[in-house]
Amino acid sequence: MSAVRLADIDKTLGARRVLDGLNLTIEQGEIYGLLGPNGSGKSTAINILCNLLDPDRGTVEIDGRPASAAARTALGICPQDIALYRDLYPAENLRFFAEIYGLAPGHASRRIAELVGLFGLETFARTPVAALSGGWQRRVNIAVALVHAPTLLVLDEPTAAVDVKARQELWLIIEALKKQGMTILLTTHHLEEAERLCSRVGILKDGRLAREGTIAEILALVPAQAIALVDGPDPEKVRARARELGWALRDYAGRMACLLPQQASLEETALALRGVGATSINLQRVSLEHAYLEVMQGA
């Protein structure tokens, strides 16, 4: 039985069709990354899954039950914005939300102690949330979403606006949750994050899943073994040489990208481009960012 199933979901907001026959399945125990640009329908899909918005058409199930019946107990929701009481300590926030979910006092105390340990919050037992750094606030935000022990955790941009160190620490926490068997739906604009954490990803485009698969399957959408970003005063010379070599070309944010059909060293790439006036060559491995751009550019 799948943890989540969205079948033939349509949703129109105003005059715009936001979701157009969306089909999405998340298996138990996996981290599924839902990717897409702003306006692609990610937030609408999450709101429908969380029973905060009704679809115009389609079926939504969580653990085999209609989302309307399962959402409260089965779902843990960690929104992009920090949803905490800033004047309360971390454990006080946890206790408040435990009461909201109806946990008995003894059960709540045990659960809070467990989460404080899991998220390393002991040091901040007497620190108001407002005094915590952005990364530690994110930790508390995720902990609150888990206080009622849900089977499915929705993480909406969980590392937004935190520094690199805090982001990597949050990745370790998310990986630890997966090892415990938690099913996680993750949205993120950090494609490195999705590539590291996710079992599968789906890329939303115009309200539909344009592509879906494992990281390896999505990377295979790029017809290359390596990417060379090339700068020079005469781009047409580079293009002409790339065509001679049988290299496909892409425009990545205004930079010319040569898609190399086989692995090559920087020295070999520079030798192949000798005489075209290249001033810099940046050789990169094929990443989820490249695959994402491939889908967005309609390749």
Image (cartoon, grey):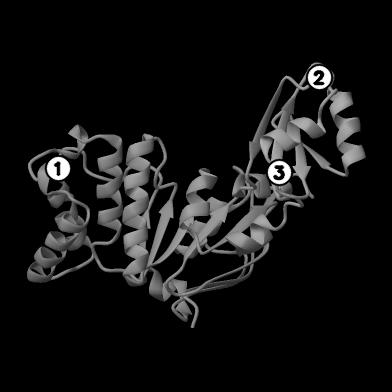
Give the vertical position of 235 relative to 38 (above or below): above
Q: Position of residue 3 (x, y in %)?
A: 46, 75
- Residue bearing the label numbered 1: 88
Camera-nearest residue between 196 and 228: 228
Between marks 2 and 3 in the image, the one whose residue lies nearer the viewer: 3
Vertical placement of residue 14 versus 68, above or below: above
Q: Sort mark 2 into few (<14), some (14-19) or many (20+) by Cα contacts within 10 Å.
A: some
C-alpha gap between disc 3 and disc 1:
56 Å
Q: Is residue 62 left or right of residue 17?
A: left
Residue drawn at (85%, 23%), measured in percent from left and top?
275
- Kind of residue indicated by mark 1: Leu
Separation of disc 2 and disc 1 at Cα? 61 Å
* Badge 3: residue crowd in 10 Å (few <14, some 14–19, many ≥20): some
The residue that label 2 is drawn on is: 277
User: Disc 2 and disc 3: Cα gap in Å?
Assistant: 20 Å
Q: Is residue 108 visible?
A: yes
The disc, 3 or 1, on the residue closer to the chain's N-terminal end is 1
SS under mark 1: loop
Q: Which residue is mark 3?
A: 264
**Nearer-the-camera pick, 174 or 42:** 174
| Residue 272 tag number | none
- Give above or below for 166 relative to 182: above
